[in-house]
Amino acid sequence: MKVKGNTHVNLSFPQMSHQEKPLKENLTQWMEFVLLGFAELPHLQWFLFGLFLVIYIIILMSNGTIVLITKMDPALQSPMYFFLANFSFLEICYVSVTLPRMVMNLGTQRRIISLVACATQMCFFLILGGTECLLLTVMAYDRYVAICNPLNYPLVMNHKVCIQLVTGSWISGIPLPIGQTYQIFSLPFCGSNQIHHILCDLPPVFKLACGDTFVNEMLLYMSVLLFGMIPFLLILGSYTKIISTILKLPSATSRAKAFSTCSSHLMVVLLFFVSALITYLRPKASHSGGTDNVLYLFYTILTPMFNPMIYSLRNKDVIMALRKLLCK
């Protein structure tokens, strides 16, 4: 059954016991969904369209500039900037999964997304989100080795190891999201086809599934544990050791420089992980479209937007490389 515009068909179902399966004739296998993100703000649609379009352009340009200068400037040919370049490229990919669709929906007011497009968006969103968690952990490990074991840093973080760490971060985040996406879209969807969200993610799509989502929810919590909690705790552990080492440095200048290189990464980590973990670990009863949308904006849009600003404003090497690029 297809939907035109924002209309949908509400089907009523007879009361069933927990064990009973819904009758086949009472089920509708939706082939399209309606993304209702920000639909409750009809008078702000064009403002939000312009705002998110400008934000998307800023993210592309700023993160693209970080990738460019780390490749071109000889002063930025170190593991830290290699990871930063990969992180900036990842942010471009990550935001491109969600923002173009959101901007198009706000501009056209045609919020329909096909089942295949919804599954594709979900799969890439989960893959890139998991990769970001792992890459942030790798960046924390790089800072840990640089500050806590500086003499062995060139040996430990050689080019081959850096390539392996980045490749591992990208590849490790692929299998589980593909399995999660396949599992959820193997279920029938019935009743409403409206997703009260800005994108196709697991929690809002769970609400539309008619079958038993217990396995899907367990997979979700498993992925949050593997790609969220464990990396976050590893990063916090690394920074505990890093701060302890920095405080022991004899020179105030050395302490300030060490804090400067680490604080930028820690700010990005806290902004991303805290908002993401709150989103997925909150009780079901506290989930609402408006609150979820705001939390998603924090780690899907604000982190990619602030990442280049945080690193460039607090890093003299990046500022010098930007000046060289602008003077050419």
Image (cartoon, helix red, strand yellow):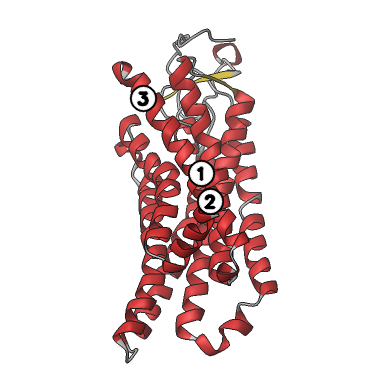
Numbered disc in front, either 3 or 2: 2
Q: Reply above or below: 188 against 156.
A: above
Could you tell me which residue is drawn at 51 percent across and 80 percent down? 145
Label 1 Cα neighbours within 10 Å, binned few <14 / some 14-19 / many ≥20: some
Kind of element beneath mark 2: helix
Q: Does residue 69 appear left or right of residue 164 in this picture?
A: left
The numbered mark, 1 or 3, whose residue comes first in the sequence reads 3
Q: Position of residue 109 (x, y in %)?
A: 45, 15
Q: Reply above or below: 122 against 112.
A: below
Q: Position of residue 93 (x, y in %)?
A: 57, 44
Q: Position of residue 312 (x, y in %)?
A: 42, 59
Which numbered tag is attached to residue 65? 2
Q: Residue furthest bottom?
A: 250
Kind of element beneath mark 1: helix
Q: Residue at label 1?
A: 61
Label 3 Cα neighbours within 10 Å, binned few <14 / some 14-19 / many ≥20: some
Q: Reply above or below: 202 against 71.
A: above
Depth order, front residue of 170/289: 170
The numbered mark, 3 or 2, whose residue comes first in the sequence reads 3
Which amino acid type is shown beneath numbered disc 2?
A: Thr
Q: Reply above or below: 296 against 2.
A: below
